[in-house]
């Protein structure tokens, strides 16, 4: 059976060891609502897509005390773990297939620990949590180590995609085999010097272009495509989003998820630019995300 832990303040607590973990519900497909409209004379309605809703899920436990004092010690301890806090509670599963998945959530209700559910020194209970982002993620950034080349500067770097350049123009394509079942939003770092840098996901057709912009040696631009961020900043932290030129797909730029029974989806990423040197590098960082557990 999968084991579950919570991470608070960087410390991981194994709930499957501390308590009699009985299971969960609400962790399959993320909740969805369709975006629709209907005209005055329309039969049915027009569908304009969908959005994921926050996920509400429950964890079930048994507190097995050696005596009444030990039972109440366990009650105090589990209440401390799930008490409301401004910081998200990280809930982590170690699955039987070897995967690890995590979700960020907050306590919302149903942790009254009623004594009517107590039998002797055994207390059955459940806790209800809400995840504003209903998708799960691998807590380790990236999932592939890419073997990279660019002249004599060839090297391997895990969890990133650098291109080491030995000529004045870059026009290279690399494939990210993305195993997630939900969109991955990368953080992209472009290290200068480079002019007219363009990053394209050929699989989705989305593009990030800096036509007319030069990133100097010793400087970099970092593009954060995650929802809630959607930022472009330089090495000084200054906002450079105005340097993006059309087509500008910052809002939607993502790694496309695997389809059907396929284990991965090939995302072909092309980087172009001029006036580059051996110091020029482009990095992708991302978390693999999943639609359910």
Image (cartoon, rainbow, N blue to C red):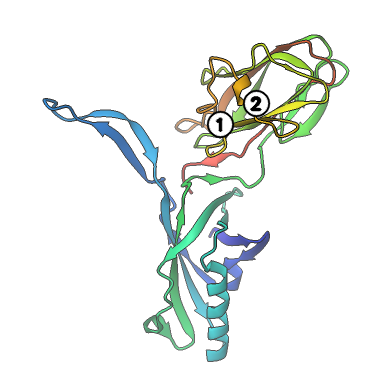
Residue 67 visible (yes or no): no
261 on left or right of 11: left
Provide residue 253's location: percent of width, then percent of height.
Answer: 54, 26
- Distance in Å between CA atoms under marks 2 and 1: 33 Å
Residue tagged by mark 1? 264
Residue occupying the point 54% across, 51% down: 103
- The 10 Å Cα crowd at callout 2, few under 14, some 14 to 19, many 20 or more, is some
Picture disc at residue 240:
2
Q: Quadrant of residue 147?
A: top right
Tell me the element at label 2.
Answer: loop
- Residue 9: quadrant of the picture: bottom right
Q: Is residue 168 above or below residue 282?
A: above
Q: Residue furthest right?
A: 152
Name the mark on residue 216.
none
Closest to the camera, between mark 2 and mark 1, is 2
Q: Position of residue 110 (x, y in %)?
A: 40, 69
In-front residue for pair 49/148:
49
Looking at the image, residue 122 lies above or below residue 154: below
Which residue is at the front of the view, 254 or 273?
A: 273
Q: Earlier in the sequence, mark 2 or mark 1?
A: 2
Residue 178 percent coordinates (x, y)? 58, 31
Helix, strand or loop at mark 1: loop
Residue 69 visible at all: yes
Point 46% across, 49% down: residue: 132
């Amino acid at each position: 059976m999968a084991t579950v832990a919570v991470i608070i303040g960087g410390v991981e607590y194994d709930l499957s060891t501390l308590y009699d973990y009985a299971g969960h519900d609400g962790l399959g497909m993320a909740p969805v609502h369709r975006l629709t409209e209907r005209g005055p004379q329309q039969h049915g309605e027009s569908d304009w897509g969908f959005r994921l809703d926050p996920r509400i899920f429950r964890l079930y436990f048994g507190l097995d005390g050696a005596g009444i004092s030990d039972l109440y010690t366990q009650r105090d301890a589990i209440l401390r773990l799930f008490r409301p806090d401004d910081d998200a509670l990280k809930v982590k599963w170690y699955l039987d297939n070897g995967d690890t998945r995590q979700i960020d959530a907050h306590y919302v209700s149903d942790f009254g620990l009623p004594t009517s559910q107590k039998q002797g020194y055994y207390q059955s209970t459940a806790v209800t949590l809400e995840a504003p982002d209903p998708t799960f993620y691998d807590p380790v950034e990236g999932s592939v180590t890419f073997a990279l080349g660019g002249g004599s500067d060839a090297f391997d770097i895990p969890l990133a995609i650098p291109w080491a350049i030995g000529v004045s123009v870059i026009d290279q394509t690399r494939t990210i085999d993305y195993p997630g079942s939900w969109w991955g939003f990368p953080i992209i770092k472009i290290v200068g010097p480079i002019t007219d840098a363009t990053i394209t996901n050929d699989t989705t057709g989305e593009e990030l272009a800096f036509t007319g912009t030069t990133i100097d040696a010793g400087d970099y631009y970092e593009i954060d495509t995650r929802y809630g961020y959607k930022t472009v900043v330089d090495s000084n932290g200054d906002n450079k989003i105005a340097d993006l030129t059309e087509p500008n797909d910052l809002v939607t730029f993502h790694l496309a998820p695997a389809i059907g029974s396929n284990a991965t989806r090939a995302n072909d990423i092309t980087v172009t630019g001029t006036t580059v040197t051996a110091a020029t590098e482009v990095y992708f960082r991302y978390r693999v995300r999943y639609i359910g557990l």
